[in-house]
Image (spheres, rainbow, N blue to C red):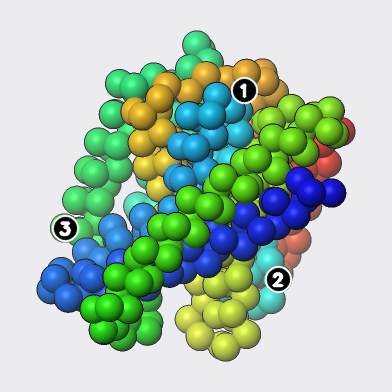
Amino acid sequence: MLDVVFIIVGLALLILGGNWLLKSAVALSLRLNIPKIVIGMTVVSFATSAPELIVSVKAALDGLPDLALGNVVGSNIANLGLVLAVTVLLGSINVRKSFYTTDWPVMMAASLLFMGFIYFDGVLTRYEGIIMVVMLFLFLVYLLRFQKQAVEDELPEDDVLLPLYRTVLFLGLGGTALWGGSELLIEGAKNLAASLGVSDRVIGITVVSVGTSIPELAASIIAILKKEKAISVGNLIGSNIFNLLAVLGITSIITPISVVDPGLLTNDIWWMLGISFLILPLVFIPKGLRLGWRDGLILLTCYITFVYLTVT
């Protein structure tokens, strides 16, 4: 029972910490006169991926590589199969042209690169991590030069310039909450896996990954309820690219990650590739560049099937 409390409190701290970090990071960048477009791509993206990054690095350093890998692979599946599904079930969304010219191809390339690195030897080494981070850097440079419009749409709306003391306070609180939340979440997840007799991978791919995807889910639902421009498909795909290239890249540079549970290679990675690929036909059929409730049902069914097969 205590493990479940640890997981819930840990997740709550991660969500709060990510939010505080985001506020302070945006305020800081505005103070430093960094162009809004750069803030959107770098600061906002890193801050929203902070929970995944902290959890994966901590898990890998604690000798729980399957939690680190399961967290990212599961998060990518949850972003599309759960978050995007729930979003389009609540209201259909139009998809931008940049989806098939940039976002989707880069996500598939990052997924295949990760698979190529880990599938044959079961290890994500330091130099592979460096290649992933370099790829992310090149992608960001490309976006800045050629895809400014797509990036401007991802900017946070309420970028009020906070007083300096509040910026520093949020930065400190955010960092502390992320650290404390990751400690509790990993402790709870590790003990829960042991008490249920399942592997770290199963807990990572279900409980932990859904938990770290909650901020995206909450933001999507709030945006739809407020009838604002809904969180776009680009935002979720961007999150998936960041999870693979930044979170796994940085984690494997700090400490190489090895696969312990072979289910990650025989099952999870294929689900991640499959659901990532599925988004393309769904966007074009039956109406071009649009996702509706039927697409949401298909994605949600895929996600529930995946969780059911993984747990059983």
Relative to 266, say whether 101 is above or below.
Answer: below
Q: Could one spot residue 245 in this view of the protein? A: yes
Q: Position of residue 29 (x, y in %)?
A: 21, 69
* Spatial separation of the CA atoms under disc 3 and disc 2: 34 Å
**Distance (Cα) linking label 1 and label 2:** 31 Å
Badge 3 crowding class, 10 Å Cα cut-off, few under 14, some 14 to 19, many 20 or more, is few
Residue at 40%, 48% in the rendered image: 242
Q: Position of residue 81 (x, y in %)?
A: 66, 53
* Residue position marked by numbered label 2 in the rendering: 89
Per the rendering, the mark at residue 265 is 1
For label 1, the SS is helix
Give residue 145's mark: 3
When asked about the image quadrant of residue 168, the answer is bottom left
Q: Secondary structure at mark 3?
A: helix
Question: Label 2 sits on what residue type?
Answer: Leu
- Identify the residue shown where x is 36% and y is 29%: 254
> In the rendered view of the protein, which quadrant contains the C terminus?
top right
80 vs 247, left or right, is right
- Indicate whether 224 appears above or below 104: below
> Between residues 114 and 285, which one lies in front from this camera angle?
114
Label 3 with label 2: CB-CB less than 8 Å: no
Q: Amino acid at mark 1?
A: Leu
The percent position of residue 11, horizontal first and vertical second, equals: 62, 57
**For residue 208, above or below residue 13:** above
> Looking at the image, is mark 1 or mark 2 earlier in the sequence?
2
Disc 2, SS: helix
274 horizontally vs 130: left or right: right
Determine crowd level at label 2: few under 14, some 14-19, many 20+ residues with C-alpha closer than 10 A.
Answer: some
